[in-house]
Structure formats: C-alpha cells, structure tokens
Amino acid sequence: MGERNQDLMRQANQAHAAGQLGNAERIVDQVLQLDSMDPAANLLKGVLAGKTQRDELAERHLRRVLKVQPESFEALFWLSILARRGGRLDEATDLAAKATAIRPADAHGLNNFGLCLLAQVRLEEAARVFANAAEMRPDFAQILHNLGTALFLLGRDLDAAKAFDRALLLAPKAVDSYLALGQVLLSQTNPGEAIKCARRAIELSPNSAEAHLLMASALVEDSLTGEAEKYMLRAVELDPNDAKSQGLLGQRYQSLGRFTEANQHLLQSIELEPKQGFAYFAYVHNNRITEADRPMVQQMERVLSNGGLDPRQLDFLHYGLGKAFENLKEYEKAIGHFDEANRLARKLKFGDSVFDREQYAADFDWLIQTFSRERIEEEKLKGSDSKLPIFIVGMMRSGTTLAEQIISSHPSVGAAGEQRFWPLRRPAIYGQNRRSLDPMFTRYGVEYAASLARIVPGFDYVTDKMPANYEHLGAIHCAVPNARIIHMRRHPVDTCISIFATPNRVPVEFAYDRENIVFAYQQYTRLMDHWREVLPSDRFLEVRYEDLVADRIGQTQRMLNFIGLEWDDSVLTHESNERNVITPSLWQVRQPIYSTSVERWRRYEPWLGAFKKLLVEK
C-alpha cells in the first residue's frame, strides 16, 4: 500500500471510529479507485455497507478480502453476520466457526457464533458458546442477555433469570432484558415480579408492543384481567403485524369465552408467522377440529417436518396436533404427539432431574400422621370464622373448572380461579423440611379470607379451584373451619390421560411420564381417603365428574344445598358465565355439558401402558 493510500486509510478509520460513516466511505472509495483489491479498503467498505444494510455490496467487498487474506477474522465475522441476516443459517454458522477458530478468545466472534447456533435452534451448543464468551467478557451485557435467551429456551429458567439479572446490572436501561426476564418470571409463576419488569420496560419504551404484551400477560396471570385487556389492545395497536401479540390477544379472548374474536386473532397470528406452535395450539383448543380443518392440520404437520422450531414452540405444536388428531379420531397419531409433547415438556421444565417418588410419598405420610382427627378438632378452634371460601379440589384435570363455572354462575358466588395462597405458604406452615407444623399456622385463615374478598369483592361466597389444595386440606380446614370443601373425582384413567394430553401452565413434577402420573394418583387417593375420614361431613362433599355430566341438575342442587344456597336458574347456563378462565379447560367450560370426556380412556386402550394399573380404581 502506497503512502497516500495509507494516509487515506488512517483518515477513513478515524472517521469510522467517530461514527462518521458517510465520510469514512467517501475516503475509502478514493483508496479503492487507486487499488480495487486493497484488502484493508475492501474490508472497511464491506463493513460500512453492512452497517448501512447494503448487504449485497458488503458481501462483494468482503469476499475480495478473503481472496487475498483467506484467514481474515474480520471478513469471516462480517460475512457470517450478513449470511445470518439473510437467513442462510448453515453458511452463517460455518463462517462463524471459521472465525472463532482463528480467534478463539474473541468475545464478539463467540457471541456471533452463538447467535448463529441459536437461530438454528442448536440450543445446547449456543448456551455453551455464550457461556464461554461471558467468561471472557463478564462486562458485556448483550452476551449475558443472549446466554439467558438460550437457557430460557432450554427450560433452565433459574439460570436464565440469573443471566438476565447480570445483564441488567450492566445495562439497567436494556428493554429487551427486562422483557426477557419478565417472560422467565411468568414461566416461574411469579406474575408480581413480571409486572415490575413490564412496568420498567414501558417506562423505558412507551411504544413497545412487546412491553405492553408482557404487562397484559402478567396481569392475567395475577388475576387482574380487567386491567390486562387495555394493555393487550394497546400492544396490537402499536404493532398489528406482530404475530405474538395477535396470538396472545386471541388467547385472552378465548379465556373470556369470546371464541369468534379469539379465532380471528389466532388465525391472524398464524398468517403473520406460520412457523410457530402457540397459535396453532390455541386455535385447536378453541375449536372442535373436523375434516373441514384438515388443511390446517396438514399445515401444522408441514411446520413440524420443516424443523427449526425452538423447544417451547415445538411442544405447543405437538400438543396441538395431539388434540387435533383426537378430534379426527386418529388416536394412534394423537398419542404419538402427546408422547413427544410430554418428552419435550419434561425436558423443558425439569431438565435431567428425576421425580423423587420416595420423598413425594413421605410428604403425604407426614400429612396423614400430623393431621389426625383430634389435632384438627383442637387446631380449628383458633381459625377464622369466615364462611366466604368455597374450595374446589381434586387431582388436576378432574373437573374442578367445570364445578367452579357452574357454582360461580350463582349470583351469590364469585370465582377467584386458581389461587396460589396455600401452596405458596407451604414452607411457612410445614417448615422448609416439610416436617414441622407452625404452631400459629391458623392465623393464615384471616389473611386468606381477606385476600379473597379483595380479589373478588361483593359476594357472599368465593370459589378457589386450585386443585392441588387437596394436599393442604388439614391446614385449610383448621384455618377456615367454616369454609366448604368440594372434592371432584373422575375416573382415574380418564384423569391420567387428560393430565398426559394437556400442557400445564406451571411445572408439575410428575405430569410428563405415565408411571409417575400413576404413582402421584395413587398417593392422591391415599391422602383423600384420610381427609374423608377426618374432615366433618358438613364441610366436605365429594362429587363425581361422571355424575355431574349425567345428572347436572341433581348434582348442582346437591352442591348448592351443601353450600347453603337457594336454587337459581343461572347455574343451568354456566357456559354464559363471563368470568375469566385461564386453565386448560377454558374452551370446555364454555360449552353446554357434554359426555365425550367420559370414558375417554377407551380411545387409547392399546396405548395406555402404565395407566392400565388404575383401571380397577373407579
């Protein structure tokens, strides 16, 4: 390079470093006029063109560099970025790998390599690369954000949250990291903290559709559904072409029973982004799939066969296809998709951890030993005198949502949905080791009744249909001894099939394996046998799901009598109840009662596996 060219390149690089891209390009063009193959000039020209979105021009100049300097890290690095931006992911990853081989300690190169792997949904590899980059540059917020993204997609929520927290310490105004951390917190069923993330994101970026969407999702999860809708509508208003916003707005209308509007938004989401799983899943669960929907099902199968979905979207797609093929009476295909969905869900939610059956059974042993009839009679004298709560409990997927929908259709009854009050207080009541009963645990009765009155004000009674409260019935009855408890029972194999075929909003440690589901069901049965013996009959009522389906009026009258309510015809039109429903039963409970869920297990009889053990337990 001549002296004049060297001087011009110094000027061009100085202008580039100062952010004067146009001036830098004018100078470098002078160098290229003198020597069109000058590698330094071609490299800078390619970088400048890449930064200003002129990708074809950028590639032309960068490839000239490689002809002269095939080991140029910078040329390989930028060509990889351009290929990734153009959707040529195999090429992008190959170029990035070559660049990192030349400079294995370059954090920027590793970060780009990780992004290429992330785009190819090679998540384990991406996480390792980002982790290496973060070790080299622990002060680089974007690398930590990208590491958190890979970990979240792998289902490693706790590690992802730590990465996003570290990123925000370095870049406290990074909207993307607040949004990502908020999604992790929602996945961990921590809507209160997710709301804080959303609020901060909206403060930093008032016109961010994604921030409004996060706020809406967190508010719905926190049972603040009235406030949520304005954020959902604002998200779509800010970006009507955002597939995620359209999909979640569709789910929001679905939860309110506004199925026509839900379908419109879900189909719009699919049109905007056919390569996804969530909107297909929500649409399938919003409708009874028939032959007329076969093109949609075939489209879902094409998305599956084309690959490239991250595990969370892939999981939704398999659950959706399972339900679609069940509706189409192709049960072998359906169970195949449910099998794959459960495999993915287990990996996402629990990684390689194993369900500890011994500990699970021991917890139930302790509850049975601790809450004897005598202990309950003694402790409940200290409890709240509130008559407000109606607990609807049972194994998950046993009909608790239907029971709540019917009962809360009565004008005297409000619906609080699934409250996490008692599960969240488990460590406080039973100790961190789950073996030491707090002598003052009954004080939670007053707090709980007040929380229900605040969440759903103005009613004589309020339902709480958290199924897992069946574990805490001893403590619950002592703390609020006047509360009514309705235990929903369903055929054990129908219950287990439904658990296996339905995604869970929150992680359920036993729910993704037939043997584990059967074991958990057997422990549930054992504990309920105990509660049946020690709880007073005027506070504990059992209702069989099958009986409620077959004799709706009779069983509804029985439940109302148990609560102490006069008959009201509104309970006969539960499908018109406009309360928000966010459980997996959100479509079913908006329909008139139907019997197709009774003896569902017979459709899957050849593939029941471990579930057959429960056929004798009816």
Image: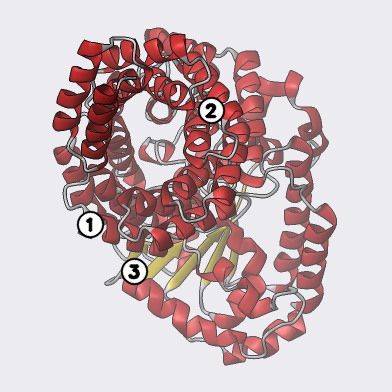
432 sits left or right of 63 in the view: right
- Crowd band around label 2 with a 10 angstrom C-alpha radius: few (<14), some (14–19), many (20+): many
Q: Quadrant of residue 611?
A: top right
Discs 1, 2 touching: Cβ within 8 Å: no
Discs 3, 2 touching: Cβ within 8 Å: no
Q: Nearer the viewer, residue 344 or 596?
A: 344
Which image quarter holds the N terminus?
Answer: top left
Report the Cα–Cα distance between label 1 and label 2. Answer: 30 Å
Residue 547 vertical placement versus 76 (above, below): below
Residue for point 64% across, 79% down: 429
- Crowd band around label 3 with a 10 angstrom C-alpha radius: few (<14), some (14–19), many (20+): some
What is the x, y in percent for residue 374? 76, 85
The nearer-to-camera label among 1 and 3 is 1
Q: Which mark is residue 120?
A: none
The answer to whether one can see residue 406 in this image is: no
- Crowd band around label 1 with a 10 angstrom C-alpha radius: few (<14), some (14–19), many (20+): some
Q: Amino acid at mark 1?
A: Leu
- Closer to the chain start, of discs 1 and 3, is 1
Residue for point 59% across, 63% down: 469
Q: Amino acid at mark 2?
A: Leu
Which image quarter holds the C terminus?
Answer: top right
- Closer to the chain start, of discs 1 and 2, is 2
The nearer-to-camera label among 1 and 2 is 2
Q: Which mark is residue 204?
A: 1
Q: Which residue is mark 2?
A: 117
Residue 212 vertical placement versus 431 (above, below): above
What is the x, y in percent for residue 561? 47, 64
Q: Which mark is residue 455?
A: 3
Report the Cα–Cα distance between label 1 and label 3. Answer: 30 Å
Q: Amino acid at mark 3?
A: Ile
Q: Nearer the viewer, residue 369 or 550?
A: 369
